[in-house]
């Protein structure tokens, strides 16, 4: 009678424990996955694309226990609708990118903010450092384009010199007037020759500046890819020529020295006599030179440089678009990985609870004389294994969340939790063929390769333009004035054309053009290769999506069956007709079924995100609403 009463009480405890254990195993997942969903129709961004929408996937309601009240720390979060933009302000990082924390308090987590997937994507778009680098490279390309456009305008420069000259004093007390006139005349001739030299020197400098500007556009513009030995030799030859021209321009002409007439000197010595020495002569000279240089014709080099700069800006814009779309996909994958880690923690906790219940039942049966010590040892081993799995799941949960934090680039003192439940994001209604065509039409990678090809075409024109003539127009206006005296200002000007034509350069220009032709072929080959890769990405994601849609239905049925199997295995074990191994196997089957349902749901969402990325996010998915 006493033994029957013990068995009856164990059965009563069992029914209570089974209800609690099953509820723990399906915490959160029962609400998110088993309930029917309603997903709004997708919006087609481009009218030219096929009509596509994301509709709710077929979902069957499963009878699962109500969620338990216990959940792991950080696993339950308030709904995303309760989070405003003001709440996200504490997540902003330090505006100084060079700031380094120096105290432990500066990296201690003091805030845990729940985020939805859409909020995480918005934070990433605003804070991600890789995207910021792409935007800075776009600004760099725009500045290079403005530099290329500057060649459409002439170069205007002004040079002004002021000189104050103090000549040595005379040794005569009464200088001869004729001698002073001769001295002033020769000084004036010297100043005229000096002014003419400065004018010629300025014209040469302006031409050299124009040649250096053309050289800079050739070797430092957006079309630069790499240097080879031939280009280095060509660059050295041009630099030597410019240095020789600069040396010739810098050598002043030989001016005659002032030599007084012997007759005047003798006469002055006789008539003037010697005295105490007179004061010197002070001269204030002001010269100004205004020069203009303009390239009239460059054999197509100027136009090609501008076109190459515009194509580079277009390529940088496409790079920003590509990085933005890839960042959105990466954030989605990180978010789904964090969701998977959260649910794995809940499953591991439920397994620990079930193992503890099983151990208590086994120990009670042993004390009643029904069970054995071997069954108790098996239950203890099962509990230890479940606890190790829980520890590993908690570690993976923290790691996955920090990975998402790193992607979002939020504050050093902030952490996140997940506000969205695990649920099917929607259903892809386009056929495989329509998806492939839409992806090939909208991918930024293909347009970027076309822009790179156009840049190579313009670089080829720039290389061949070195064999053509270059015509430069130059003009200058100069003036000379002696201040604080009766000297009348002198004016002069010069206008001319300069033609440069390289008839033979050892094959350097044609070799450079051949390199650009190879770059054109490379861009075309990469275009074909990328096109094939995009198609394979679409096909793989599409097949994965269809497979996981079927796996979701199968996994839901398996979870229901595994839950019932565990209940029957425990009843058989407590009644003495089953073994501990049967209970362990049933528990393992339930955990595996729950993991399969989780994996199928998240893999479905990952495949859906890849398809959205493949078509350039031209389809906007409406978040799922629970009925």
Image (cartoon, rainbow, N blue to C red):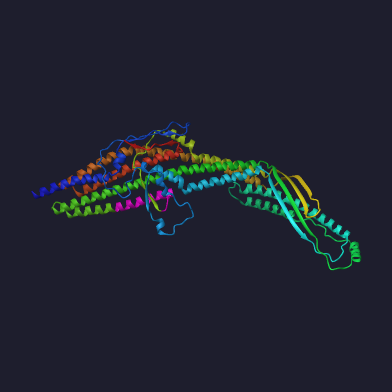
Quadrant of the rendered image containing residue 455: top right
| Count of all numbered marks drawn on residues in the image | 0
Is residue 184 within the magenta segment? no
> At 56% from the left edge and 41% from the top edge, which residue is drawn?
453
Q: What percent of the width, then of the height, locates residue 86?
A: 41, 45
Is residue 392 within the magenta segment? yes
Q: Which residues are magenta?
A: 388-412
Magenta portion: prevailing SS class: helix
Q: Is residue 502 visible?
A: no
Where 281 falls versus 467 (above or below)?
Answer: below
Q: Quadrant of the C terminus?
A: top left
Q: What percent of the width, then of the height, locates residue 350?
A: 26, 48
Q: Is residue 377 visible?
A: yes
Taking depth in this image into account, of 264 and 459 the one nearest to the observer is: 264
- Tell me if 436 is positioned left or right of 19 in this view: right
- Tell me if 93 is positioned left or right of 522 in this view: left
Where 96 falls versus 510 (above or below)?
Answer: below
Q: What percent of the width, then of the height, locates residue 514?
A: 62, 44
Q: What percent of the width, then of the height, locates residue 503?
A: 71, 45
- Tell me if 488 is positioned left or right of 569 in this view: right
């Amino acid at each position: 009678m006493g033994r029957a009463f013990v068995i009856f009480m164990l059965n009563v405890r069992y029914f209570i424990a089974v209800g609690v254990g099953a509820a723990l195993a399906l915490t959160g997942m029962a609400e998110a996955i088993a309930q029917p969903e309603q997903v709004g129709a997708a919006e087609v961004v481009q009218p030219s694309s096929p009509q596509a929408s994301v509709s709710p996937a077929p979902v069957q309601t499963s009878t699962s226990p109500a969620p338990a009240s216990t959940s792991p720390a950080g696993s339950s979060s308030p709904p995303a609708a309760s989070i405003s933009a003001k709440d996200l302000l504490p997540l902003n990082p330090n505006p100084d990118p060079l700031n380094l924390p120096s105290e432990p308090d500066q990296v201690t987590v003091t805030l845990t903010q729940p985020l939805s997937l859409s909020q995480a994507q918005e934070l990433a778009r605003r804070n991600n450092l890789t995207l910021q680098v792409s935007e800075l490279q776009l600004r760099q390309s725009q500045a290079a384009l403005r530099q290329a456009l500057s060649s459409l305008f002439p170069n205007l420069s002004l040079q002004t010199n002021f000189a104050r000259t103090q000549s040595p004093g005379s040794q005569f007390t009464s200088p001869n007037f004729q001698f002073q006139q001769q001295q002033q005349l020769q000084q004036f001739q010297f100043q005229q020759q000096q002014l003419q030299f400065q004018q010629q020197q300025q014209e040469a400098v302006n031409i050299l500046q124009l040649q250096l500007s053309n050289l800079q556009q050739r070797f430092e513009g957006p079309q630069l890819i790499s240097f080879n030995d031939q280009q280095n030799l060509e660059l050295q030859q041009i630099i030597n020529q410019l240095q020789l021209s600069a040396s010739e321009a810098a050598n002043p002409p030989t001016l005659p020295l002032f030599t007084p007439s012997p007759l005047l000197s003798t006469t002055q010595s006789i008539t003037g006599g010697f005295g105490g020495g007179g004061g010197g002569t002070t001269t204030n000279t002001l010269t100004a030179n205004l020069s203009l240089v303009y390239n009239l014709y460059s054999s197509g080099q100027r136009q090609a440089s501008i076109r190459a700069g515009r194509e580079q800006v277009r390529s940088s814009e496409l790079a920003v678009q590509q990085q933005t779309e890839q960042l959105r996909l990466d954030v989605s994958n990180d978010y789904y990985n964090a969701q998977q880690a959260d649910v794995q923690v809940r499953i591991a906790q439920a397994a620990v609870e079930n193992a503890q219940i099983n151990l208590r039942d086994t120990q009670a049966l042993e004390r009643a004389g029904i069970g054995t010590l071997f069954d108790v040892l098996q239950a203890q081993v099962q509990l230890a294994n479940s606890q190790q799995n829980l520890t590993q799941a908690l570690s993976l949960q923290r790691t996955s969340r920090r990975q998402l934090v790193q992607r979002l680039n939020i504050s050093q003192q902030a952490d996140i939790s997940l506000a969205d439940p695990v649920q099917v994001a929607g259903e892809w209604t386009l056929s495989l063929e329509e998806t492939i065509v839409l992806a090939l039409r909208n991918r930024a990678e293909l347009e970027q390769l076309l822009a790179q090809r156009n840049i190579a075409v313009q670089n080829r024109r720039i290389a061949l333009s070195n064999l053509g003539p270059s015509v430069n127009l130059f003009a200058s206006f100069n003036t000379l004035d002696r201040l604080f005296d009766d000297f009348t200002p002198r004016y002069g000007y010069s206008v001319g054309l300069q033609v440069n034509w390289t008839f033979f350069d050892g094959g350097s220009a044609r070799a450079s053009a051949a390199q650009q032709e190879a770059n054109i072929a490379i861009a075309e080959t990469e275009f074909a290769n990328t096109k094939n890769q995009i198609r394979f990405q679409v096909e793989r994601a599409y097949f994965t999506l269809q497979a996981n849609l079927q796996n979701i239905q199968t996994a839901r049925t398996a979870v229901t069956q595994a839950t019932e199997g565990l209940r029957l295995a425990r009843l058989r074990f407590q009644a003495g007709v089953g073994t501990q191994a049967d209970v362990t196997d049933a528990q393992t089957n339930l955990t595996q079924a729950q993991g399969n349902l989780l994996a199928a749901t998240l893999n479905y969402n990952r495949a859906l995100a890849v398809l959205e990325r493949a078509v350039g996010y031209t389809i906007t998915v409406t978040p799922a609403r629970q009925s």
